[in-house]
Image (spheres, rainbow, N blue to C red):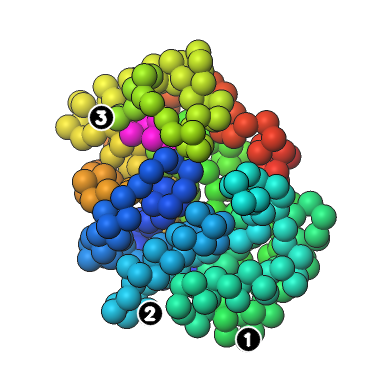
């Protein structure tokens, strides 16, 4: 497994990371034993970055990761944690909080659930509109100075916010959605992070399964599945987007790889040593497929064909519903 550094100041991590959200929340039922086996398989394959959020499954995801890491060398794994998304007992989304006191309290609970004395990268899940980013980052820096956090990250932050945050303390990376059909970061955010020496951890590289090659229009979704509310999975939008995926599949077929693999390889190919794709595999077979993307080299002709098939802005529908889009500093 190749490794890279998150930005110029972050931790050394594997060239691909594992996003654990779907093992506990938002994509319908998951098998706990299979999830733990998948984490084990990822670690055994050399994946050293695991991403979670304290609000995934109301803390259950952190407990799951703690169980999977039991008996392993803690220093072999970089754990990235998002905080600040407030939910009610029914799982509904309320707001995003990043006040300094909330930062420190959330961290205390996270350290307890994960059974560790430090978090490798700690980041607000969203920018709190009521709290200057300087105050949020300043609070995390205090936790860095105290030894409870190793590095500071951001998530879904816009270019101006990234600059303001970086003026307070070193920022290792910005976690943000990036895929062949979600290319919004290319205009302002990616140039800014590259100028400042900040890495990108790219989530949604398969656009929540849309680019997996396994999605069908008649798929039944659980009541709490995020995709049941995502504009890209609704009505005519879904068929339009699946038509785009079919074109990607044709390119993948010509290379003898899967649709998911070429989608992940496309994200990796955009890197200048600064982008780490996060894969959301919940099963070992999906993990194995995703890891196969690391062996794919996309030629200039391949990349040109993909751009022609799926040009920027080709997807139908926003990547979140309107109410959630309003919380994205990266989209303002």
Between the C-alphas of marks 1 and 2, the distance is 18 Å
At horizontal 76% and vertical 65% (from top left) the residue drawn is 99
Which of the marked residues, 3 or 2, is nearer the chain's N terminus?
2
Task: Give the magenta range.
Answer: 207-212
Marks 3/2 in contact by CB < 8 Å: the verdict is no
Mark sitting on residue 146: 1
Whether residue 300 is visible, yes or no, is: no
Q: Of residues 86 and 294, which is closer to you in this image?
A: 86
Q: Quadrant of the N terminus?
A: bottom left
Q: Quadrant of residue 170?
A: bottom right
Mark sitting on residue 252: 3
Q: Quadrant of the C terminus?
A: top right
Does residue 152 lie above or below 293 as drawn?
Answer: below
Q: Quadrant of residue 85?
A: bottom right
- Residue that label 2 marks: 75
Number of marks present in the image shown: 3
Name the residue furthest front: 89
Name the residue furthest left: 256
Marks 1/2 in contact by CB < 8 Å: the verdict is no
Between the C-alphas of marks 1 and 3, the distance is 48 Å
Camera-nearest label, 1 or 3: 1
Residue 91 appears left or right of 271: right
Q: Is residue 263 magenta?
A: no
Q: Quadrant of residue 13?
A: bottom left
């Amino acid at each position: 497994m190749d490794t890279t550094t998150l930005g110029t100041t972050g931790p050394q991590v594997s060239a691909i990371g594992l996003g654990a959200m779907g093992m506990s929340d938002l994509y319908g039922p998951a098998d706990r034993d299979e999830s733990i086996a998948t984490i084990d398989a990822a670690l055994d394959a050399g994946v050293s970055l695991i991403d979670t959020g304290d609000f995934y499954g109301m803390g259950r995801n952190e407990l799951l990761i703690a169980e999977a890491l039991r008996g392993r060398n803690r220093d072999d794994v970089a754990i990235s944690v998002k905080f600040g998304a407030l939910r009610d007992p029914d799982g509904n989304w309320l707001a995003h909080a990043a006040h300094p006191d909330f930062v420190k309290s959330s961290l205390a609970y996270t350290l307890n659930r994960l059974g560790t004395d430090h978090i490798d990268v700690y980041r607000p899940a969203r920018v709190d509109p009521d709290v200057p980013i300087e105050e949020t980052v300043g609070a995390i820096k205090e936790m860095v100075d105290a030894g409870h956090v190793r590095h500071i990250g951001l998530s879904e932050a816009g270019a101006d916010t990234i600059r303001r945050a970086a003026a307070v303390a070193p920022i290792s990376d910005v976690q943000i959605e990036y895929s062949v059909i979600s290319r919004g970061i290319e205009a302002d955010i990616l140039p800014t992070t590259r100028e400042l020496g900040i890495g990108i951890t790219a989530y949604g590289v398969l656009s929540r399964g849309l680019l997996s090659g396994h999605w069908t229009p008649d798929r039944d979704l659980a009541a709490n599945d995020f995709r049941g509310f995502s504009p890209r999975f609704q009505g005519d939008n879904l068929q339009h987007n699946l038509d785009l995926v079919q074109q990607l599949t044709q390119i993948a077929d010509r290379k003898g790889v899967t649709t998911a693999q070429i989608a992940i390889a496309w994200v990796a190919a955009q890197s200048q040593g600064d982008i780490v794709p996060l894969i959301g595999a919940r099963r070992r077979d999906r993990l194995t497929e995703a890891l196969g993307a690391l062996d794919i080299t996309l030629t200039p002709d391949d990349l040109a064909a993909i751009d022609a098939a799926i040009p920027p802005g080709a997807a139908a529908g926003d990547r979140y519903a309107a109410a959630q889009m309003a919380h994205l500093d990266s989209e303002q």
